[in-house]
Amino acid sequence: MNEHTSPIPGAENPELFTGLKLEPVKTTAAGMPAVLNSFKHVFREAGIVRGLKALAQLNQKGGFDCPSCAWPDPDDERSGIAEYCENGAKAVAEEATAKKLTAAFFSQHSVSELAALTDYEIGRQGRIAQPLYLPQGATHYQPISWEAAFDKIAVALNSLASPNEAIFYTSGRTSNEAAFLYQLFVRAYGTNNLPDCSNMCHESSGVALGESLGIGKGSVKLEDFYEAEVIMILGQNPGTNHPRMLTALQKAKANGALIISANPLPEAGLMGFNNPQQLKGLLNRGTALTDVFLPVKINGDMALLQALEKLLLQAEAQEPGKVLDPGFISSRTTGYTEFAQHLQQQDMEALVQACGIDLPQLQEVAGLLKYKKKMIVCWAMGLTQHKNAVDTIKEIVNLLLLKGSIGKKGAGTCPVRGHSNVQGDRTMGIYEKPSVRFLQAIQHSFGFTPPAAPGWDVVEAIKAMYGGKGKVFFAMGGNFLSATPDTQYTAAALRKCLLTVQVSTKLNRSHLVHGEEALILPCLGRSDKDMLHGEEQFVSCENSMGVVQSSKGVLSPVSHELLSEPVIVCRLAKATLGNRSTIDWDKYLQHYDRIREDIERTIPGFEQYNERVRIPGGFYLPNCNREGNFDTASRKAHFNIATPLTLQLAPDELLMMTIRSHDQFNTTIYGLDDRYRGIYHERRVILMNQGDMNKRGLQSGDVVDLFNYHDGVERVARRFIVVPYPIPAGCTATYFPETNVLVPISSVADKSNTPTSKYVILQVKKHI
């Protein structure tokens, strides 16, 4: 038995069943069930008055930004009925809950008692109402004053042999203002150890787009969807993860767009949409979305794209200048000749085998793309969490470059981000590998020399803690343990820290798997009013398409002891740095406009920040690709040459990808139902191809154990229920975080170092 597996149900891998019920898989998303579920969650947690007040201002101009996904709000008028989706409403319900946890709760419940709960049960407890401290060897959290909490953190940080022994994690929930101050403090303290949630999701997108096109962001605006001829959706489930995207797809469809979806699972949100803001949607007479569905194998996307590109090159040879965009290719790109030669050498039969789509269907799709020039390609973590993720995303770029589909209306790249300000955090400098240009701007603005050596990303930080090099762990939001790979290994790493600190709104598992000492610092949420010196403050966020807009809470906080994230950072900096700091932290504690003034003079694109962010709807940041330019060394876009990854599975092996249920957002579990997939009251399931079940003598409802043996280490998730599902042979799917325990810490994407959570080799064995 190695040290990061457990012989019995443990705090990181509860194994209790909750009662599985299966129904037919749905073929459309949203509609009346989405409306009813939204109100059920909001009214149960926040009550009718508080709940309706929050929903009325959610995603409205002058209101607060949804704490869920980063899909953009319309640039023009926003719906007065509901400018949010079901999961946005659930996220607000979680945050606006009237339940609160005081010192009495923690005196009654030990850490070990709380750790025995599931993630769903932990999240249902309520908002944390006051700062909490867990002394070394203690069994219960106890109240602590803010002053004492900051002093303890300062002492721990200032006692380290080097600032590089501290790790400062960031969640995508953090606002621009808080993120800017946070990275400023961390660099003034002396390290670039700034891992963040981007490292685990769209880091591969940023690397691929940066190297190919010169900017690590997508190029499209929401209005481009309405002018597109073709929209391709790869490795994404918008019905669950980005439901408001369905409205944009519906409008694009009405304007004549062709929608092609490639995914291992036939997700309801890809197939059809019952718009709850339209009568026919409420009556279950919605819009069919996908014109062509391609049930690609897990990680078969590069092979799929190359097969289509090869067919398009053949068509171009027959009709020169009509299929591709030779003028764009010759004037705006580099590497085309080598790329075309590489494609010609690829064996079509091998590509067909690798992607799992038969040649006639590939020829059909190539025929549909043949004369189209305005194409948008969307993708999410179904592409980013593979070993070859960066090259796969570069293959998307290759396809768009062939068609001249970047830098024009109705065309471009669209990585669909997860958490609501994860893109903004990176813009603000939350990055372990800052550019020389950014560090020079920090030095010029604040008069100190920031560290230049690269810091640790998420995987490197976990390994550093496990090896005793990372000794203080500070998390600005998020649920680090449940979000990260190799759960038992990560838990062991966190437990080796001298101090772990979590800035949080609600209780989560990362509070229960801790260092020798632990602190919980409760903060305001997006929906909470933020008062400073008697004046309401607002923060700002950046969405997936580069729009920066204000976010202003409307609800009275559940406790007077909550602080905002910007205030927490300032007070932490003052306590830790003292008179060593060249930064005037006190001015930021007077008004958030002072923060935005310093962002403006440090980060390009934020000219007249305070004025423009007050414009209803906000403003777009500069985007060179959107303007048809490429900020690469050659000033041109780069074609990339890569070969699809071939994996030879043993007869007893399968490939697993982790997915979300419809009742969750990232690690937050709202309920136990996955309505669109017809799975109710249970999360400990494995979706399997019927043929794979037959080969193993398995039937629906059988209980199995799941094993991964990467690098000779046994990782196990016990007691999962088999559910037959239309998924390609050799492929399986399970929910995270329950199966993060199987994702190896040492299996990462090339260049981006993102954990390969969608590419886990699995053995399935009947539970004994």
Image (tube, rainbow, N blue to C red):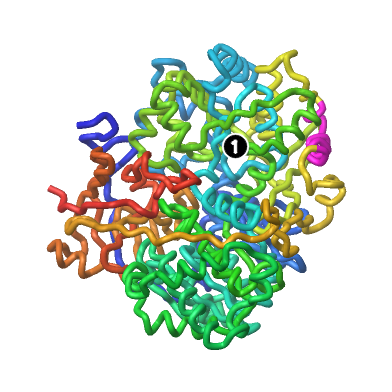
Q: Is residue 610 above or below residue 336?
A: above
- Can you say whether 512 is above or below 252 in the image? above
Which residue: 39% across, 42% down?
Answer: 485
Q: Nearer the viewer, residue 763 or 119?
A: 763
Find the magenta span and give its range. Answer: 587-601
* Left or right position of 70 against 3: right
Q: Look at 52% across and 51% down and name the residue there.
A: 204
- Report the residue that reaches farthest toward the bottom: 319
Q: Choose between 416 and 445: the one closer to the eye.
A: 445
Residue 482 in the image: state x and y as whole percent.
42, 41
Residue 251 visible to an observer of this rendering:
no
* Dominant secondary-structure state across the stretch colored magenta: helix
Q: Is residue 512 visible?
A: yes
- Is 665 positioned to the left or the right of 54 in the image? left
Amino acid type at circle 1 is Lys
Q: Where, by quadrant of the figure, is residue 748 drawn?
A: top left
| Residue 567 inside the magenta-drawn segment | no
Work out whether 717 lies above or below 269: above
Q: Position of residue 593 (x, y in %)?
A: 82, 38
User: Can you identify the residue that label 1 sits on?
Assistant: 433
